[in-house]
Amino acid sequence: MDYHVELKRVTRVFAKNGEQIRALDGVDLAVARGSWTVVVGLSGSGKSTMLSLIGGLDRATEGEVWVAGNDLGKLSSDALADFRREKVGFVFQSFNLVPTFTALENVCLPFVPYKVARAQAEKKALEVLEQVGMLARANHLPGELSGGEQQRVAIARALVNDPELLLADEPTGELDTRTGEKVLELLSKLHRERGMTIVMTSHDPRIAEQAPAVVRLEDGRVVAHAT
Ligand SMILES: Nc1ncnc2c1ncn2[C@@H]1O[C@H](COP(=O)(O)OP(=O)(O)OP(=O)(O)O)[C@@H](O)[C@H]1O
Ligand SMILES: [Mg+2]
């Protein structure tokens, strides 16, 4: 089986005030290419830590993290940064948009390190803004958009590099139920159309109920993995 993401006995220890916290403790995980996995668990169970390791934002203390055939622990910091930019899209609970940039400028941001010509970057950014239904708001600042609209802009920004893997950490966490459902519908549409692999975290048991694959974490350990 060609897994897109594989964790092998992954442990992440944080040292805090002389105390060691095992945020992840010997986790095994296999995510099929093109699948949609929801990671659930109580606050502090290790969900964000797991996404950060898969996305190359953080490194495992022990064990191996494999994504698209790369052993992330073996990559240099520069190679890891390239991996993140080219292969992964990130969506966060708090949108993380730059408040002084318009929606369009925010979506163009991932192109900055590549020095892509402005016209070319904007053309691509407008395409993805259209896909998420935000074309009409391209010139608005985040502060002029609702939470759901800001999250759609953040999703557009995550998609602008055509990532194979989308990681979303509580993408509906700051949205009301209805708006959250709309954001999920959008992710579902993008998943179908683009065939991307999605790994997202959620506190919401209803989201887990609808998910095709669920990973449940408790105190840094996987206690259930249903596909
Ligand atoms: N940078 C860090 N330094 C020290 N401890 C950390 C750090 N990041 C996470 N932790 C600890 O690791 C554990 C797992 O944290 P994590 O953020 O992965 O949980 P989570 O499941 O995402 O929780 P939440 O649902 O509240 O977002 C927690 O005990 C947390 O306090
Ligand atoms: Mg978290």
Image (tube, rainbow, N blue to C red):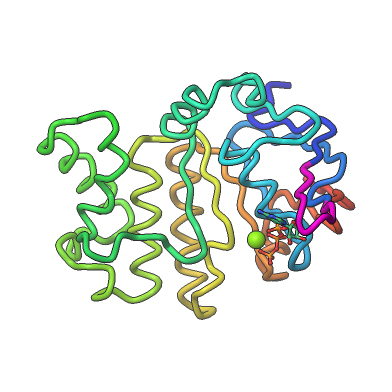
| Residue at 77% from the left image edge and 43% from the top image edge | 12
The span shown in magenta is 12-21
| Residue at 70% from the left image edge and 55% from the top image edge | 47
Q: Name the residue nearer the viewer: 88 or 224.
A: 88
Query: Magenta segment: does it hold 214?
Result: no
Vertical position of residue 35 compared to residue 151: above or below: above
Query: Main structural element of the magenta stretch: helix, strand or loop?
Result: strand
Could you tell whether 127 is left or right of 74 in the image? left
| Residue at 67% from the left image edge and 70% from the top image edge | 204
* Picture quadrant of ligand 2: bottom right
Could you tell whether 218 is left or right of 74 in the image? right
Q: Quadrant of residue 147?
A: bottom left
Task: Pinpoint residue 180: horizontal percent, then vertical percent.
Answer: 50, 71
Task: Pinpoint residue 132: horizontal percent, then vertical percent.
Answer: 33, 56
Furthest residue in direction front, as rendered: 18
Query: Magenta segment: does it hold 17?
Result: yes
Vertical position of residue 144 compared to residue 202: above or below: below
Furthest residue in direction left, as rendered: 119
Q: Give the quarter of the figure containing the C terminus.
A: top right
Q: Give the quarter of the figure containing the N terminus.
A: top right
Vertical position of residue 139 compared to residue 22: above or below: below
Q: Quadrant of residue 27?
A: top right
Task: Pinpoint residue 102: horizontal percent, then vertical percent.
Answer: 20, 61
